[in-house]
Amino acid sequence: MALVRKVLVLGFLALAACAGEDIDEEPTTESEAALAATAYQLSDEEALATRTRGDCELKAGDLVFHRSLSEQAGAIAYLTQSQLTHVGVVFKVAGAWNVYEAVGPVKITPLESWIGRGQGKKFAASRYKSDLPAKTVKALFEAGKPFYGKPYDLLFTEGDDKIYCSELALKMYERASVSLISFFWSSQFSGLWKRVDRLAGWSKFEQELASPADSSDEKLVKKIMAARGVDAREFASQVLVAPVSLSSKEESGGVFRQTCAFGTH
């Protein structure tokens, strides 16, 4: 039972883990999504595809964000001071728009289903700072394949055996280079890995550590530290990537730019 409780507690925090028109195509089935993730090759047309949803234009390779309905979303929002608690990468796959995401196992989820899981069906989107050629978008899709089916990383480590949502998105981009100067491509993303104590909500958390009236979100963070057997100083030094760090020019240091503000579009 103690082990079960520990696993449940670790699941509370997933840092880094829209009403509108219907999609034109039928969503992919689970088996089709699995095939697409592991074997399907994007065509040039799919790699350059766009999807208009209300006032939001999505392109293959864009990042999409929402506020999760899961309990751990409160802790993510608390530490990052952002409503963006989950992120995935959008592609047109086998005729339907889908999101490559790490949630439980890494998988491909129909876009409309993904949006429907977010609080209030609201989402935001961001895009790489310059237009991506078809070959780079296809390389981005290929970079996700080795992660397909991998379990969720409850400890938020940098290894590849388990992976959380924003880690998946960032690693896909880091590994999507198709040029001879791959070092310069991947190095631009290195600054998006941040220590926990550089998150926007960390100073507030430190100030409230001794408070007898913890908020529910703060309690989740404390439970995570207790389950790991670490103190605040050790937890603060952990390096990770939070969803919000990929969401805009300001947050990403110019690597990504916001294309759709958080809303129902």
Image (cartoon, rainbow, N blue to C red):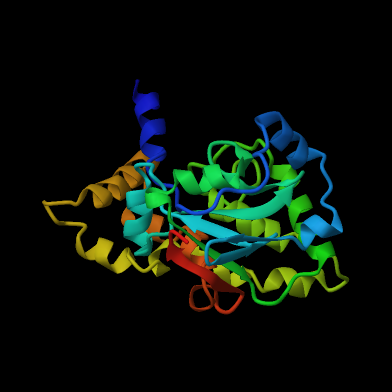
Residue 235 image position (x, y, % from top left): 39, 55
Depicted 116 relative to depicted 129: above or below: above
* Residue 215: % across, % down: 19, 51
The residue closer to the viewer here, 148 or 30, is: 30
Q: Residue furthest top?
A: 1
Given residues 194 and 265, the one toward you in this image is 265
| Furthest-left residue in this view | 212
Question: Would you say 242 lies left or right of 37 here?
Answer: left
| Residue 193 appears in the picture as rendered | no
Q: Quadrant of the N terminus?
A: top left
- At x 55%, y 71%, the residue is 259
Q: Is residue 61 above or below residue 92?
A: below
At which x and y percent is residue 179? Answer: 86, 69
Residue 114 percent location from the top left of the image: 53, 45
Q: How many marks?
A: 0
Q: Is residue 255 visible?
A: yes
Give 151 or 109, whichever is nearer the viewer.
Answer: 109
Horizontal side of 45 relative to 123 (left or right) equals: right
| Relative horizontal placement of residue 162, taking residue 211 as reference (left or right) | right
Residue drawn at the location 78% of the way across and 55% of the way down: 46
Write the residue at 88% across / 71% down.
Answer: 180
